[in-house]
Image (cartoon, rainbow, N blue to C red):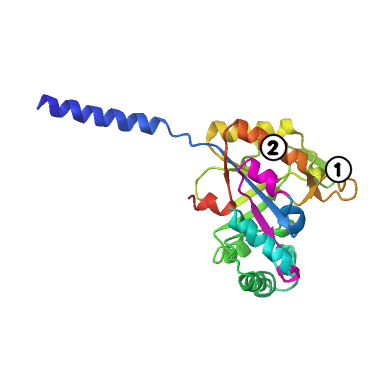
Amino acid sequence: MKRWWYYFLLIVMSTTCKQGKTVQQGGIAISFDDRFVKQWYQLRPLLKRYNVKCTFYITQPDSLSDEEVKMLHQLQKEGHEIGCHGAMHVRSMYYIWDFSLDEYMKNEIFSALRTMKKQGFNPKTFAHPGGSQTWYSDRELLKYFTLLRDVSMKTRTIWDYDFTHEIEDIDEIYYQHDNTQKVNALLIDTSAKLAIADIKKGLNRASKEGSVLMLFGHKPLTKNTKKMDGYGFDVQFLEQILLESAKLNLKTYTMQELTNPL
Ligand SMILES: [Zn+2]
C-alpha cells in the first residue's frame, strides 16, 4: 500500500514539474507583401542559410508571368507559404464604403482566390492591403481564411503628430499561441526607420515569454536598388534580424503555422 502511495506521489510531482515549464520556445514570423517575386526569389540563399520559412502575400496574381508562378511554386516547395493579398490591392474599408461588402468579396477576394487556385496555390491566410479593415469584413474573410494579418508600425502619424512606441511594448505584434485569427505584423521597410537595437528588444521579448514576433516588408533592397526605391527593406537589415534571431534560437513560422502549428 505504502509503495502505491510512493508511485502516486512521483507521478503527481513529475506532472507538476512539467506544468511549471510552460514557456514555449520563442519564434519569429516574417511575411512579404505585394508581388516582388523575382527579388524575393533572390532571398533564397539567405533564407536557407538561416533555415527560415516565410510567407509571401501575393496581390494582383493575374498579372504574374509563368516564370513568376514557377518561382512561387519553388518557394512553396521549400516550405514557404503563399498567401493572398487581394486581386486589386484596395483598402477594404474605403472600397466597401464606396461599393458594398458583396462587391468587395467578389472583386477583391474571390477573384484573387480563383486566379491563385488556377495557378496551383491554395492560400489559407490573408494580408490586408494598406492595413485597412473593419470587423464586418473580417467576419466575412474568416469564412475563407484561417488568419488575417494587419499592419503595425513603430511610429504612426496622426494629424501631424508622431506617436512612437518601443518595440517591446507593442503587444499586437507578438503572437501568444492563443489561436487568435487577427494579427498584426511590424513593418520593417526602410521608411519605418527601425534600428537593429529595436528589433533585438522585440526578439528578446519573444524569447522570454515564448511568443512569436511578427514582422513584414515589401521589396528587398540592396546597395544597387536602395536609393531608387524606398518601398522596401534593406536585405542587410533582414540578415541582421535573422542572425539575432538565430542567436536566441527562435523558431520560424509561416503565418499559417501560427494557428496551425506542425
Ligand atoms: Zn500591399
Instruction: Name the residue type under label 1.
Output: Lys
The response on whether ligand 1 sits within 8 Å of label 2 is no
- The residue sitting at 54% across, 49% down in the picture is 258
Identify whether 3 is placed above or below 181.
above
- The residue sitting at 59% across, 50% down in the picture is 254
- Asked if residue 84 can be seen in this view, the reply is no
- Indicate whether residue 64 is drawn in magenta: yes
The residue where tag 2 is placed is 241
Q: Residue furthest left?
A: 1
Residue 49 point in image, percent of width and height: 65, 41
Q: Residues within 10 Å of mark 2 (few under 14, many from 20)?
A: some
Instruction: Name the residue type under label 2.
Output: Ile
The residue where tag 1 is placed is 223
Q: Residue furthest right?
A: 228
Q: Quadrant for ligand 1?
A: bottom right
For the record, the magenta segment spans 43-65
